[in-house]
Amino acid sequence: MVMKDVIKKNKMWLVGIVMILLLAVTRPSFRTSYNINGIFLSMTPNGVVAMGLMISLLVGKINIAIGSIMSMAAVIFALMVPRVGVFGAAVIAVLCAAAVGVLHGYLIAYLRLNAWLVAMALMLSVKGVAIQLAGSGSVQIQDALFSRVSEASLGPIPASFFLYILLVIAVDYVLLKTQFGRNLFAVGGSEEVAAACGINAKWLTLIAMTLSAAVTGLGGVLLTTRLYSANGNMGTSTVMTCLPMVILGGSTFTGGKGSAKGTVAGCLIIVLITTFMNLFNIYIHVQTMVQGFILLAILISDKYFANKKIKV
């Protein structure tokens, strides 16, 4: 019975391990340091943005504006590097993203506007800001320190991946070990029940959306360090990429569930699926179709289990 519980709790990690073993056996190129480095590079920005999405889902709000926020933060970072340096630019980009989160949280928590419509409006307007700032093109970065930071690694593992792991540890600690984290779960479970227990649901929703946007902004910064450039359209498919990661990691659209470690497992599986398709030379439009089917399957399964829970 104990083994069954362990398997159930870590099933996504087990799926990831099986996928790694299959790819390692069937495709020798998978075992190369170049490919391993590529997996870590793909996981890092997507994983960080997925973490931001997980935080918003935790309180029952799906932040579909993450792609636009990521793009805006990336463009701001690229523009500010020559002016204030790499680390100063990163701080400014994350703070600008957090400001969008504050606005988002205030509109849905205090003004009680429809969360989906607000996210849609912000997605369009923030993307417009990003495109305007970038001048309808890409902002290139040419900075010696930036190049050293971008290329820093430990063997095949890029330094940015270690920052991602530190973020995972920090988020997991806050969610599982602090009263603030437990209150976020309570708000996601039921705002009314949480309010009846003396929890300020409005304030916590605002904080959650702010943190979601700030973490997403960090993801935009990390993506820029990988691409050496930024533009207003770079986050177009972000929701489609990151949403399956978060749901596979244990989050739900109704809120009250989610974990940092689970999101990492979901990120690993999606990146491995993409790696599999690339190694087997599957056409990009077929990859997009597969991603769509995965997302559709996740939506259907989430609805099925939600209905099953209601019946019970």
Image (cartoon, grey):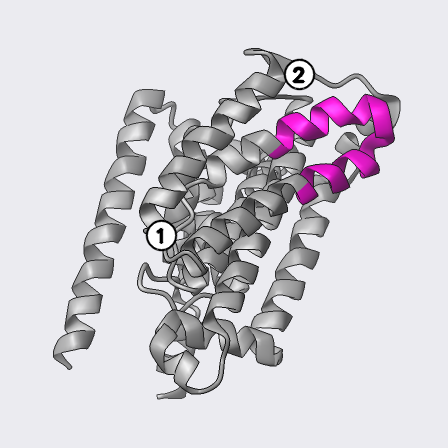
- Name which residue lies at 49% across and 43% down: 24
- Is residue 21 among what the camera can see? no
The 10 Å Cα crowd at callout 1, few under 14, some 14 to 19, many 20 or more, is: some
- Name which residue lies at 48% across and 85% down: 198
Q: Nearer the viewer, residue 176 or 285?
A: 176
Up-down relation of residue 270 to residue 32 (above or below) = below
- Name which residue lies at 15% across and 68% down: 307
Q: Position of residue 171 (x, y in %)?
A: 61, 64
The tag on residue 113 is 1
Task: Name the residue beneath numbered marker 2.
Answer: 139
Label 2 residue SS: strand
Label 1 residue SS: loop
Q: Position of residue 98 (x, y in %)?
A: 62, 47
Up-down relation of residue 22 to residue 203 (above or below) = above
Which residues fall within the magenta stretch? 73-95
Which of disc 1 and disc 2 is earlier in sequence? Answer: 1
The answer to whether 11 appears left or right of 205 in the picture is left
Structural distance between the alpha carbons of marks 2 and 1: 35 Å
Residue type beneath disc 2: Val
Marks 2, 1: nearer the viewer:
1
Q: Position of residue 182 (x, y in %)?
A: 52, 78
Q: Nearer the viewer, residue 6 or 94?
A: 94
Up-down relation of residue 296 to residue 13 (above or below) = above
Q: Position of residue 274 (x, y in %)?
A: 42, 35
Q: Main secondary structure of the magenta part?
A: helix
The answer to whether 305 appears left or right of 153 in the picture is left
Up-down relation of residue 279 to residue 94 (above or below) = above
